C-alpha cells in the first residue's frame, strides 16, 4: 500500500544500521573532552600572546580619546582566552595537570 513504511533494506539488499545518538555525537559533546579543548585553547592563546603581544589586536591602534581597543569577533574571543590564561595561570596549569592525569589514567 502507498502508506506502508519503507522496507528496512536498501536496493542492494543490505540492512541499514539504526542511527543512535552515540553514533552522531562528537568528542566536543563529551564533558571531559570539552574541558580539554577549552584548556588547550586557553593555553595556546596565552602562549601565542606571550610570544607576540599584538597578535589578537587585529592591526588596530588606539585612536585619540580611546582608552582601550575594541576586541570583538574571533580575535576578541581568543584575546579573552589569553587573558584568562595570563591572570589565572596557576589555576589553568593545575587544571591542565589534573586533566592530563584524568586522560592518561582514568579514560
Image (cartoon, rainbow, N blue to C red):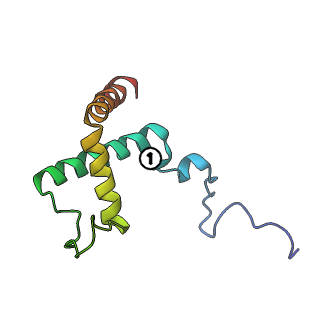
Q: Nearer the viewer, residue 39 or 107?
A: 39
Residue closer to the observer: 51 or 1: 51
Outermost front residue: 65
Looking at the picture, how far across and down is residue 73, in whole percent? 37, 68
Camera-nearest residue between 96 and 68: 68
Query: Is residue 16 left or right of 61 when viewed as pictured?
Result: right
Residue 84 figure quarter? top left
Q: Which residue is mark 1?
A: 27
Determine the residue positioned at 76% across, 67% down: 6
Please report the residue visible at 30 percent of the width from the left and 37 percent of the height from the top: 88
Q: Tell me where residue 98 appears, x and y as whole percent.
A: 33, 26
Q: Considering only vertical position in the picture, is 6 above or below 103?
A: below
* 105 over 96 or under it: above or below: above
Crowdedness near tag 1: few (<14), some (14–19) or many (≥20) residues, C-alpha within 10 Å: few
Q: The C terminus appears in which quarter of the rendering?
A: top left
The N terminus: image quadrant: bottom right
Q: Which residue is painted at 49% across and 42% down in the image? A: 30
- Could you say which is closer to the camera, residue 12 or residue 24? 24
* 13 with respect to 1 (left or right): left
Q: Position of residue 60 (x, y in %)?
A: 22, 73
The kind of secondary structure element at disc 1 is: helix
Residue extending furthest toward the left? 51
Residue 95 placed where, x, y %?
Answer: 33, 31
Amino acid at each position: 500500500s502507498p502508506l506502508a513504511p519503507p522496507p528496512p533494506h536498501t536496493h542492494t539488499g543490505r540492512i541499514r544500521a539504526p542511527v543512535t545518538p552515540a553514533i552522531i555525537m562528537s568528542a566536543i559533546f563529551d564533558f571531559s573532552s570539552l574541558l580539554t579543548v577549552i584548556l588547550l585553547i586557553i593555553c595556546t592563546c596565552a602562549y601565542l600572546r606571550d610570544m607576540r603581544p599584538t597578535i589578537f589586536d587585529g592591526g588596530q591602534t588606539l585612536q585619540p580619546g580611546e582608552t582601550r581597543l575594541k576586541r570583538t569577533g574571533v580575535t576578541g574571543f581568543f584575546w579573552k582566552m589569553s587573558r584568562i590564561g595570563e591572570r589565572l595561570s596557576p589555576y589553568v596549569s593545575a587544571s591542565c595537570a589534573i586533566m592530563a592525569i584524568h586522560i592518561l589514567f582514568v579514560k
